[in-house]
Image: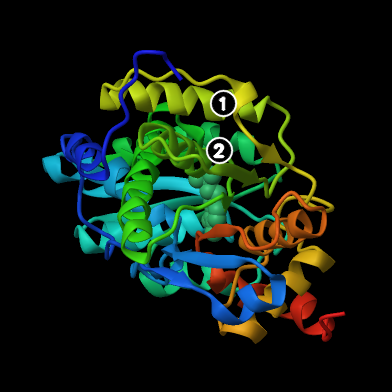
Amino acid sequence: MSSNFVPLTAQELVAKINKIPRVSLALLPTILEFAPNISKELGIKLYIKRDDCTALAFGGNKTRHLEFIMAKALSGNYDCILTGASSQSNFCRQAVAAANKLNLDSFLVLMHGIKGKMMQGNFLLYNILGANVNVVEGEDLEQIPKHLDIKYNELIKEGRKPLLIYGGFGKEDTVLAGISYANAMAEIDLQMKDQNFMADHLFVTAANMTQAGCELGAKVLNWPTRIQGVSPVYWEMNIKKDIARICNEGAKMLDVNLEFTDSMINHDNNYVGEKYGAPTTDGIKAMKLLAKKEGIILDPVYTSKGFAALLDYIKRGIIKKGENVIFMFTGGSPAVFAYNEELSKSQSLD
Ligand SMILES: Cc1ncc(COP(=O)(O)O)c(C=O)c1O
């Protein structure tokens, strides 16, 4: 932390965030729910930030991101959005739902990931939401921006006015998404005060931007909490560096004097399993445990792996008995229906 940094209150942080253009899409604040049964089972105090309940088309962390990323859509210069990812993308689901709320058409450029052409989960929801879907060949998601650029030029030739959203593939969008999670941290700050505790740990399943927002918020608010990111994917790039970049650019945007380096970031990719999108045995067990104890359904691609990490960190003594732990539930549950085989095969919790 820069030596002359003066921490902000939640209200001061929110006042800074409110200066950034934004469109209202999410039902906020989401609740911070104490989970009594699983807390007892695990010997900790577990609180779940219910960002699966942001309300837009089954909710999730991307609704917060899109409030800032889609603010440009209010200018009246666009008649549609164009974005892309894998065919089970939670981001695309929420982006199409957001576009519908803003009276814009949607165009999606998708790559079939592990779930192929299965008309289920998010892929089914694009259909219900009325998106125009274009599936491109290949498995390398890093090629998506190139395909988006091609589709963008086609749409322009057809006389459309697309808002091109790179999302996680765009540097500016990742910073705006990070800001939205600094805002979530301000919410949690007030909720912890109400519930009379301070978190020792916060777990978040994150590729990059959601964790960056949590890191930024925690530092601005001067929490003593250990933030732990859990990766759903193996990266080629140095992801801790990228998270620090988002934090630094976010700090600049908020005009706060903080500096982040990759050595400040805890980000664990030991729970990915075989690859992105493939559920793990421990993830499925973690998912079934939380469902059984609290009636909360995690998702098979992201949050089940994050929760499996949390359980393992307790076993390894990194989370100690009696500590306060927040689990950021970033949504994604509609994907369970696309993973019916994997999930139903694994019957037991043992
Ligand atoms: C349910 C869920 N959790 C976590 C993430 C990771 O978020 P980020 O890419 O912002 O780090 C995603 C991203 O797609 C997601 O859909």
Tell me: 63 left or right of 285.
left
Residue 265 vs residue 197, the one in the foreground? 197
Residue furthest toward the top?
3
| Residue 315 locus on image (x, y percent) | 81, 59
Instruction: From the image, tell me which residue sits under label 2.
Output: 208
| Amino acid marked by disc 2 | Asn
Residue under the point 77% across and 79% down: 341
Q: Say which residue appears at 69% left-offset and 58% top-offset.
A: 310
Q: Dividing the image into 4 quarters, which one contains the C terminus? A: bottom right
Q: Amino acid at mark 1?
A: Asp
As drawn, 166 above or below 31: above
Q: Quick one: label 2, few (<14), some, or many (20+) residues within 10 Å?
A: many
Residue drawn at point x = 33 percent, y = 70 percent: 55
Contact between marks 1 and 2 (CB within 8 A): the answer is yes
Question: SS of the residue at dot 2?
Answer: loop
Task: Give the residue at mark 1.
Answer: 242
Image location of residue 294, percent across then percent down:
57, 82
Disc 1 within 8 angstroms of ligand 1 (CB): no
Q: For residue 7, which quarter of the picture?
A: top left
Earlier residue among tags 1 and 2: 2
- Residue at horizontal 75 percent and vertical 43 percent from the top: 269
Whether the residue carrying mark 2 lies under 8 Å from ligand 1 is answered with yes
How packed is label 1: few (under 14 Cα within 10 Å), some, or many (20 or more)? some
